[in-house]
Every structure is written in C-alpha cells, then in structure tokens.
C-alpha cells in the first residue's frame, strides 16, 4: 500500500501543475504545441486515471510484492550503500529502455494500435497526466518493462521506491507538453524528454517513430528517430538563416 501511495502522490503532484499552466496560459512560449486540451478532456483523463489506478495498478502492486520478496527484496536495516543503489538504478533504466522500446513498437502494429494503444494516443497534445492514460492491457504490458529490473535484482525497498519515483517523474516530464530551458534533455546526453516524445504523439501511428522510454539510444540504433532528427535539422537551419538575416 505504501508503494501505491507514493506513486499516486508523486504522479499527481508532478502532473497536475501542467494542467494549470495550460489553462492559465502561463509559460506558453515554452509550450511545444499551440493547441490546448479542453477542460472536459482533462477531466476525462483524471477520471479514467483514478479508475485504472485503483482497479489495475493497485492490484498489480499487491500481487507483485510477494514476487519481489521471493526475489530477495529487503525492507529492513541496514540500508544499501549509494554505490549499490546507483548501479541498480542505472541497470533498471538501461533494461527498461530496451524492453519498453520493443514493447512500444509492437503496440504500434495495426491491430494492437487500433484495439489497445490508440487509447493512449487519444491525446495528440499530451500533458503530464496523460503519461499513464492507457488501456488496462497496455498498463500490464508496458508495466513489465518497469518491474523486470527490480524483479531480477531483488533490491531494497528504498531502492524500489526511488526507481518508481524517478520513472514517474520522467514519464510525466516526457508528456508534459513543454520544453523549458532547464529541461533535462538540454543537458543530459541521449535523454529524450518532452520535445522528443511530443513528436511521437503528433504523427500517425505508422509514421511516428520515437518509441524510446527515457534514453533514446534504441531509436538511434534502429533508425526510428530519422523523421524527428530531420525536423530538428530543418528547424535549426531555419533558425540560423533567420539569425543571419537579422
């Protein structure tokens, strides 16, 4: 139950401010798309999220706890060293990126997109909370990418909670719809962020690309970010020409 409460607190506290920003028109110069979601669409998202979180996420967390315990997860003292925590978190990010990428590509096949993944893509202009707005089958399918790492290593409960918090903050940021000067993608190599994932939501499912989760190395290796990189190059070239003219 503690994991569920932490998840809900971090998710809604980090995601709700972006609804306020959009409705109030604040920091609009950093908004990636000019289109805004209607209050009705935002409220629908929140209602569905609460339903899915209590009917899918909570039971999944309850069922998975004994599995983590069986795999060696501890919740007592002593706490793990920072080196152990850091190495496990890095491993989780690498593995999650790999598993998520292939799972996400599969969801963009015609049948699965139509019957499952299209729910997540109802919001072509994403905002923070849409990160977890998905069909229950997708929640289970892609949720595996998040828990496979911890299920292998059997971490301390503190490490598991830290991983969950970081993963929630990352996916909310990727769907927030804003690219700020302080966004991690401006400083952290291979980090996708909102601009990278927003491109994925704007295009048709057969042409979108940008399937990666946190870091974009899988898209780069398999060339599924070519359209995005071409667009960025065109924008960069246009900005340089405008600068020369002025």
Image: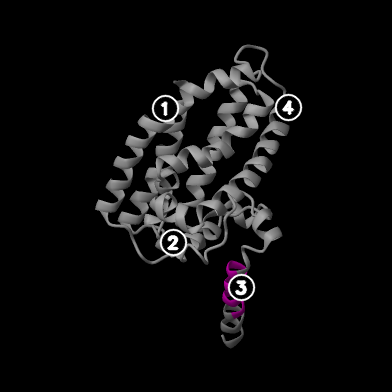
Q: Please report the bounds of the magenta region as a residue range.
A: 227-237
**Cα–Cα span, label 2 and label 3:** 21 Å
Tell me, what colour scheme is on the image? one colour
Say which quadrant the N terminus sits in. Answer: top left
* Residue at x-position 41% and y-position 48%: 130
- Please say if the residues under marks 1 and 2 sit with CB atoms less than 8 Å apart: no
- Please say if the residues under marks 1 and 4 sit with CB atoms less than 8 Å apart: no
Q: Residue furthest front?
A: 111
At which x and y percent is residue 3? 48, 25
Task: Tell me, for residue 230, which label it has, or none.
Answer: 3
Q: Earlier in the sequence, mark 2 or mark 4?
A: 2
Which residue carries the number 4 mark?
84
Task: Tell me, for residue 31, which label it has, or none.
Answer: 2
Q: As drawn, is 55 to the left or to the right of 43?
A: right
Element carrying mark 3 = helix
* Residue at x-position 40% and y-position 60%: 124
Please identify the quarter of the rendering in which residue 235 is found. Answer: bottom right
Q: Earlier in the sequence, mark 2 or mark 3?
A: 2
Which residue carries the number 1 mark?
58
């Amino acid at each position: 139950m503690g994991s569920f409460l932490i998840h809900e607190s971090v998710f809604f506290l980090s995601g709700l401010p972006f609804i306020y920003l959009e409705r109030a028109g604040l920091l609009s110069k950093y908004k990636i798309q000019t289109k805004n979601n209607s209050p009705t669409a935002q409220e629908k998202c929140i209602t569905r999220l609460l339903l899915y979180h209590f009917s899918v996420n909570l039971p999944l967390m309850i069922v998975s706890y004994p599995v983590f315990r069986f795999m060696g997860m501890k919740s007592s003292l002593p706490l793990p060293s920072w080196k152990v925590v850091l190495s496990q978190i890095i491993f989780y990010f690498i593995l999650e990126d790999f598993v998520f990428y292939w799972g996400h590509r599969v969801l963009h096949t015609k049948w699965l997109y139509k019957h499952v993944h299209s729910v997540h893509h109802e919001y072509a202009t994403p905002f923070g909370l849409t990160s977890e707005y998905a069909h229950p089958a997708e929640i289970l399918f892609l949720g595996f990418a998040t828990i496979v790492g911890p299920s292998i290593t059997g971490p301390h409960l503190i490490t598991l909670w830290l991983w969950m918090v970081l993963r929630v903050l990352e996916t909310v940021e990727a769907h927030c719809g804003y690219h700020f000067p302080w966004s991690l993608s401006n400083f952290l190599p291979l980090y996708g962020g909102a601009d990278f994932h927003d491109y994925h939501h704007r295009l048709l499912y057969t042409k979108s690309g940008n399937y990666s989760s946190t870091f974009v190395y899988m898209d780069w290796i398999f060339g599924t970010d070519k359209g995005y990189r071409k667009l960025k190059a065109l924008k960069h070239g246009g900005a340089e020409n405008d600068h020369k003219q002025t």
